[in-house]
Amino acid sequence: MERLTYQGPQGWQVEEGRLAEALERLARFETAYEGILREQEELAAIMEPLKAAGRQKSAQFRELLGKKLTNQQLLLRLEFAGIS
C-alpha cells in the first residue's frame, strides 16, 4: 500500500495534492472497521443460541468462533496501533 501521509514538524500531513485520495482511503477504512465491529456483534448473536443448546463442538459453531477470533485479533492489532 502506498502511503499518503507523513509525520511532519506539525504532526501528520498529507502529500501535496493528495488530500481527496487520503480522505477517500480513510473513509473506506472507517467503513471496513465499522463492518468488522458489526460482524462481531452478529457472530455473537448467532453463537449464543448454539452455545445455549450445547452445540459448541458443532462445525457451525467452530467456524463462527474462528471468524470471531480472527476479527478480534485484527481489532486488537488496530487498538495497539492506536487506531481504535
Image (tube, grey):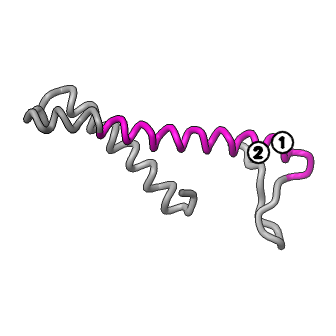
Q: Which residue shows up at 36% across the image and 35% down it?
A: 42
For this orientation, the residue located farthest to the left is 54
Classify mark 1: helix, strand or loop.
helix
Q: In which quarter of the image is the N terminus?
A: top right
Residue 70 % position (x, y):
37, 42
Name the amino acid, label 1. Answer: Ala
Residue 80 % position (x, y):
49, 62
Q: Mark 1 points at which residue?
A: 20
Determine which quarter of the picture holds residue 50. Answer: top left
What's the CA distance linking mark 1 and mark 2?
Answer: 5 Å
Residue 15 falls left or right of residue 81 = right
Residue 62 falls left or right of residue 75 = left
Against 3, is 47 above or below?
above
Classify mark 2: helix, strand or loop.
helix
Magenta residue check for 33:
yes
Q: Which residue shows up at 78% across the image and 69% down it?
A: 11
Q: Quick check: marks 1 and 2 in contact, CB under 8 Å?
A: yes
- Residue 47 is labelled as none
Determine which quarter of the picture holds residue 26. Answer: top right
Task: Tell me if mark 1 has few (under 14), some (14-19) or many (20+) residues whose alpha carbon lies within 10 angstroms of its own.
Answer: few
Name the amino acid, label 2. Answer: Leu
Number of numbered discs overlaid on the protein picture: 2
Name the magenta segment's main secondary structure: helix
Q: Which residue shows up at 45% across the image and 51% down it?
A: 75
Residue 18 falls left or right of residue 47 = right
Span colored in magenta = 15-44
Task: Tell me if mark 2 has few (under 14), some (14-19) or many (20+) residues whose alpha carbon lies within 10 angstroms of its own.
Answer: few
Residue 31 % position (x, y):
59, 39
Magenta residue check for 39:
yes
